Amino acid sequence: MAHAILSDSELLARLVAFDSTSCNSNLPIADFICDYLDRPGVVVERLPSPDGDKVNLAVFVGPAVDPETVDGLLLSGHMDVVPATEPEWQSDPFALTDTGDRLVGRGACDMKGFDAIAINAAAEAADQGLRNPLVLVLTYDEEIGTIGAHDFAQAWPRDRPLPRRAIIGEPTSLDVVRMHKGHLKMRATLRGQEAHSGYPHLGRSAIEPAARAVTALAELRETLLTEPCPHAEHFPAVPFVALNVGIVRGGSAVNVVPARCDIELGLRILPGMAAEPYARRATEAIEHAVAGSPGVSVEVEVVCSSPPLLTDENNDLCSHLYGLREQSATVSASYATDAGWLQECGLDCLIFGPGNIEVAHKPNEGIPKDEFRQGGEIFRSLVTRYCA
Ligand SMILES: [Zn+2]
């Protein structure tokens, strides 16, 4: 017998209760979703990660996708959350708490609130005899670099079409976002020679050339400020490629010449830009800075890359949502999402969901109850419009 359908907030509470922080396996929450959606009229496919510790889910309701029209609707969300270790939490982050006008818990906003709405929309549509398919794509490891969406886009057979209209329900306060920046993450590993600091001639410090590399990256960052970028007008606050050295890690003790230093950096490119030239420039800056240090080697690698998103506003879903939300101007986002990869499966992706991105990744993350309810109504109306 199929499980009774929970209310959106009851389902959200169940999803929040799983500690699906990206460092953990997402199999428990995925198993719960599979079990919840185990009902006539719903087909769930599991797409395991290469090591089998995580799983993407693809959920199908209604007829097969018509390869000619690629009609229907695809809704996508990630199942993982960022860590909830901040001491400022006023309630258990994994117990959804009603504070009057908000529902608070890790992931309530980013983005289990949307997930609950999408999963319920699929469950409710199961016995409605849809004319066009409703598809959900639920991913792992979005928060650590859109890994699950990358793996999904790599694995999904190109001769198996998905509905072209797609919404990634990241929290946008129900604004329609059709473009966002990409994020390229890189790591440089410098290796020297360890020695007692009393005998420095026997060692080769990895930290000193790393400091020069960081200075070179700061110069590259300044240069990037001055370079014109496509679609810069849609990113008025930061109309350039932003470079950030986020982590420097090296050394073991004050009395030891350090043998190793790691530098981690990110570059946020604009829509229409390729990541490779920026990866190359950062690599050259680092290698050049380290070249003057004999006995120190450096290895620079791209850790992961989330492509930018650019969707034409002349598509029917975008126009419909603009009308619904009385929005006329393009809204852009400076963060990357799964959409960058999912668009490679032929999807026209929009970012649109309840909740405010400003409270995501912070203690006492929550979603306004009003907006959550409104989001539920809008997504159900979209399923009716495009699938029923
Ligand atoms: Zn998110």
Image (spheres, rainbow, N blue to C red):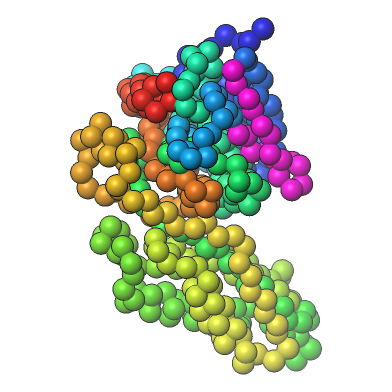
| x and y, in percent, of residue 383 in the image | 41, 25
Vertical comparison of 339 with 229: above or below: above
| x and y, in percent, of residue 159 in the image | 61, 46
User: Could you tell me which residue is drawn at 29 percent across and 47 percent down?
Assistant: 314
Vertical comparison of 125 with 272: above or below: above
| x and y, in percent, of residue 23 in the image | 66, 44
Q: Is residue 97 visible?
A: no
User: Could you tell me which residue is drawn at 50 percent across and 28 percent down?
Assistant: 133
**Is residue 133 shown left or right of residue 203?**
left
Q: In which quarter of the image is residue 310?
A: bottom left
Q: Looking at the figure, which quarter contains the C terminus?
A: top left
Q: Quadrant of residue 193?
A: bottom right
* Residue 321 falls inside the magenta stretch: no
Q: Can residue 127 be seen in this view?
A: yes
Q: Of residues 214 and 380, which is closer to you in this image?
A: 380
User: Could you tell me which residue is drawn at 47 percent across and 45 percent down?
Assistant: 347
Q: Of residues 305 and 252, which is closer to you in this image?
A: 305
Q: Looking at the figure, which quarter contains the N terminus?
A: top right
**Is residue 51 shown left or right of residue 39?**
right
* Residue 56 falls inside the magenta stretch: yes
Q: Of residues 92 and 313, which is closer to you in this image?
A: 313
| x and y, in percent, of residue 41 in the image | 59, 18
Stretch of the chain drawn in magenta: 41-58
**Is residue 228 shown left or right of residue 62?**
left
User: Main SS of the magenta segment?
Assistant: strand
User: Could you tell me which residue is drawn at 33 percent across and 67 percent down?
Assistant: 230
* Count of marks placed on residues: 0
